[in-house]
Every structure is written in structure tokens, then in C-alpha cells.
Amino acid sequence: MGLAATPRKIDWFRWFFLFLGIGLFCLVYYAPPWPSAFDPMGKEFVLSPQGKAALALFLLAGTWWVFEVLPIGVTGLTIGVVQALFFIRPASEAFKDFMDPAVLFIFGSLIIGAVFTKVGITKRMAYKMLDIVGERTSMIYLGCFVITALLTHVMAHTAVAATMYPLLLSIYALYGEGDRPTKFGKGLFIGMAFVAGAGSIITLLGAARGIVALGFFQQITGREISFFELTFYMFPIGWLMVFALWGLIMILFKPEKAEISGLREKARELNAAMGPMTRDEKLAGIIVLGVIVFLSMQSFIPALQAFNKAAVLLVSTLLFFILKILDINDLEAVPWNIVLLFSGAMSMGFCLWQTGAAEWLAINWLGFFQESHWFVFVLSIAFFVMIMTNFIMNVAAIAISVPVALVVAPYLGVAPEVIVFAALITAGMPFLLLVGAAPNAIAYNSKQFTSGQFFAAGIPASIMLMALVALAVLLVWPLMGMPVLLPSP
């Protein structure tokens, strides 16, 4: 006699937020036309039906991502499907963004992480680091965060996260809890994602957003901000945030164990047992170092700037397979859930941009503050960029808000430099949603936390970020010589 099948329990929480997302979409999509926005010069920005539909999709995707009602990659796929079925954008455009160079850059970064894990480079790095920082879990946190931040000074934070991810897995394996989620695991991976953003604001090599913002600054003001000037003003802010995040992670995710007894000795033994570097380790190290050097030199050598970053990074992927460091099984093991997540995020960002919805949002938001105190206006820009960069590419968030802000700023007597730098700080640190930055999604692949737990940790981190922007604008930058207000006529 066969056993009766156990009835599947209904997940009411999941179904509630699934239909909440659909309800929000329908509410906005079928609403009457919304009023136009007007910039300080009186120019009208009409919200088209496609733009209103893009905002509806924006709410649907945000709800599903935060509460993880579907696998995050499937929600990403939903973004393309809805655009095509509701005629928000043609299917050829909506799905073309799924293979945007930025998505392929993330794919290439994930491959580098897989290579470092397979050949053993990350284990060597982990054992060496643990030998230095010792057995206290608080110092392990700090060591991992400092290394992450330092690497973002010379390479893209996506590549840094892909490099650090397997290293953190190796460290966590020595914690003694297997694959089981723990506070230490959550703190290790969420902290890495947060710190990768904090470190990436310090130089132009950490992310593309800096180049875009400085380009707008030069176009609108006629002045240029150099690589070293940006680093000078961002260095104290970035590192203040790194150490503040370490303190926050210690509060939110205080490790279950204050120290891991015998860890330093164990790390030395495991490192010695690995023996000398293998052929594959040397080849992988040389290939990745070559790519990093090339990408770094693009900021200094104009002749190299024409080469697409994703294409350069993918040369390493090709070489890994040509040299048989990787095989078909490694390709099939790529976390496609993460790739689809970012594919959908890119499509959502371009959808808001091309339909005019993002610009309409920015004009309306900044319109509330164009008569306010200059300090409130600067913080409002930073806050808007912080929220938008959690949903769309930080480059797009900069592109829709900074030009408008730079037009409004002179009316309030605000120096353009402070506008650009404040926006760049928050653009680099999307702490709320996994789609805000590639390091967030890469960290999620550890399975140590849910998207809801990431969001919950991101709320105090974002509050701390806004407090740091306020400190920079009122105290740090003026003391360093940055003009905050325009001279009186």
C-alpha cells in the first residue's frame, strides 16, 4: 500500500507579495496620464504612456526582488517579458540589453572567480591572510574588508568581488559550520559587497560611474576634475565608510565565535600542504594580472581607451578554455541566476532611461528642493542617486540626476564640485537591493543570506551613508579646500 502524498503547504507570504507586485503594476499602468514635470528653466517633460508603464514595471520588479517571490534571475527575465508583452519597448530592444557589455563583464568576472577557486589561488590567498590577521573573527572581518577596499583602487569592483568571493568561501570553510548560514557568514559576504562599493569611489579605476560624472561636469561647467583631484577628496570619505561599515557589520552580524582556536596554525599547515604553485595557478595569475594592468592603463593612455572593457576581460575567459584551465563542466556551473539578475537590471535601467521615466522622476524630485536651503538640496541629490542606483545602473542614475542638479545649483549658490562628489559617493554604494551592484549579487551566491536580509542590513548602512555625505559636505571637504558655495557676486 503506497504512502499518501504529503500536501504542499501554501506559502501565503510569497503569494501576497507576488500579487502585491502585480497589483502595483496594474494600479500605475492603468492609471490616467500623470502630469508633466518642469525643470528650473521652464522646459516641460511629458510622461509618455510607455514611461508610466516603465514606472509600473519598476514597482513590480522592486517588490519581487526585495521579497524574493521568484528566483532573482527569473524576476530579471520577467522584466524583458513584460516590456515586450505590454509594448513598453520592442522585444528586440528589451532583450538586447540582456547581453549588454556590462552583463558580459559580470560574466567574465564570475569566470575569473571560478578559475581562482579551481586552481587554488584563492586558498593560498586565504591562508596567507589568516596567518597575518590571526584567529579573532573581528580581525578576520577587518582583514577581508581592507583587502577588498584596497583592490578596488586599481580594478573594477565587480572584478574585485569575483576575486574575493572564493577567498571568503575558503575562509568560511575554516569556521567549522559547513555550508550552514551563520551570522559570521552573513557579515563576511554582505560586508564584502558593501565595502567593495565604498572602496570603488576612491579612484576612477573602481567603476565607470566616475568617468561619466566628470564628463558631465566638464561639459556643463567647462572645468576639469583630474584623476588625482577626485582621489584626494574621495580617499578620506571612502576609508571612513570602510571602517564605519566594519563597525556596523560587527553590530548587525556579530560572529557566534569570538575567535577560531588554532586557526592560524591550521592555515599555515594547509598552505604548506598545497606545495609549490602549479602550472595552472601561474597561468591563471599571469592572465588575470595582464587584464587588470590593461584595464588600469586605459585611464592613463588615451590609445587604449577605445578597447571595450568587457571584450578585454573576456579575453581571459577565452584563454582559460584554450589553455584547458577550464572545461565545459565549469561553464555549466556558472551561476546563471546572477547573470539573469543583472541582465534584467540592465534592461530595466535602459527602459526607464529610453522612455523618459527616469528623467521625469529626477526633474520632479529635484523640483521639490529648488527653493530649499543649499545643504538640503545637496543631500536631496545624493539621496535621489542612492535610491535610483539600487534599481538601475549607477551610471544611468548619475546621467539623469547630475546634469539637472548642475543646472539648478547656481540658483542656490552651490559650487558644482560638491554636487558631483556627493552624487558619486551614493552612486557607488547601493546597499538595499541585490541589483544595485554586481558585488551584491556575487555575495548573494554564497547562500548565506536572503534578499530580504540584505535589504534589512542595507537600511542602517544607507542611513550611515547619508550621514557621511552630510559630514563630508559640511566639514571634511571645506577643510580640504573644496569650494562648497559659490562666491557672492
Image (cartoon, helix red, strand yellow):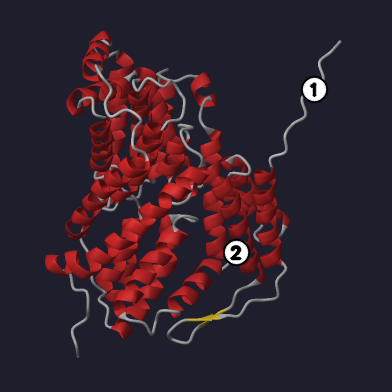
Q: Is residue 430 left or right of residue 15?
A: left
Q: Residue at x 55, y 34 (%)?
A: 336
Rendered view: 459 above or below 157:
below
Q: Residue at x 65, y 50 (%)?
A: 17
Residue at the extreme bottom of the image, as rendered? 489
Q: Position of residue 155 (x, y in %)?
A: 29, 42
Q: Is residue 312 left or right of residue 481?
A: right
What amino acid type is highlighted by mark number 2?
Answer: Leu
Q: Residue at x 33, y 57 (%)?
A: 465
What amino acid type is highlighted by mark number 1?
Answer: Ala
Query: Does label 2 or label 1 sit earlier along the sequence?
Result: 1
Q: Quadrant of the N terminus?
A: top right
Q: State the mark number for residue 5.
A: 1
Q: For numbered disc 1, what is the local secondary structure? A: loop
Q: Quadrant of the C terminus?
A: bottom left
Dot 1: within a 10 Å radius of its alpha carbon, few (fewer than 14), some, or many (20 or more) residues?
few
Rendered view: 87 above or below 449:
below
Residue located beneath label 2 in the image: 55
